[in-house]
Image (cartoon, rainbow, N blue to C red):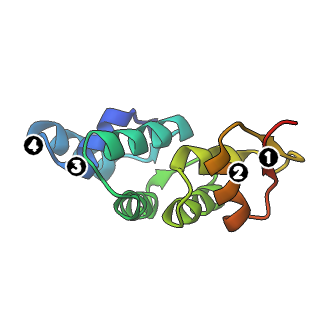
Amino acid sequence: MIAVDTNIVVRLLTQDDEQQYNKSLKLFQDEDIFIPDTVILETEWVLRFAYKFKPVEICTAFKNLFGLPNVHISNASLMAEVLQWHENGLDFADALHLAQSQNCSALYTFDDKFVKRAKELTQCEVKEPL
């Protein structure tokens, strides 16, 4: 198994550089691939800011990618939850933070929007410090 960096995933998903896309595609066709959570997080940011992908487009791209039989991520059920929350309006990074913090009694933040959306979408306790 090999791991890939953000630029490999971005080239595969955007196909914006033919030579690099073909090299990325070959890796994904020939190898067992591990994509670290940090690469997933950075890829979402790049797709959103540099390529103007909408949340539904990002989630669709990730679902297709993570559905490949040779692609492995650290926790598929956790990432499915992150994608669902993101599709329903939670910021991707916030959804990942929240999903990875579910075994804690609460997640504290100064982000009012995060607190509000998390309460609407999840049973997790997200709140501002007193």
At a point 53% along the width and 50% down the height, the residue shown is: 91
Q: How many marks?
A: 4
Spatial CA span between label 1 and label 4: 46 Å
Instruction: Check disc 1: other Cα within 10 Å, few if <14, some if 14-19, many if 20+.
Output: some
In what element is the residue under mark 3? helix
Q: Are marks 1 and 2 in contact (CB under 8 Å)?
A: yes
Q: Which mark sits nearer the N-terminus, 3 or 1?
A: 3
Residue in front for this viewpoint, 124 or 59: 124
Q: Residues under labels 2 and 4: Cα distance?
A: 42 Å
Residue bearing mark 3: 14
- Does residue 100 sit above or below 60 in this rendering? above
Query: What residue does disc 2 label?
Result: 115
Residue 56 lies in what quarter of the image? Answer: bottom left
Tag 3 and tag 1, C-beta contact below 8 Å: no
Lower position in the chain sequence, tag 2 or tag 4: 4
Quadrant of the frame with the C terminus: top right
Residue behind mark 4: 18
C-alpha gap between disc 3 and disc 4: 10 Å
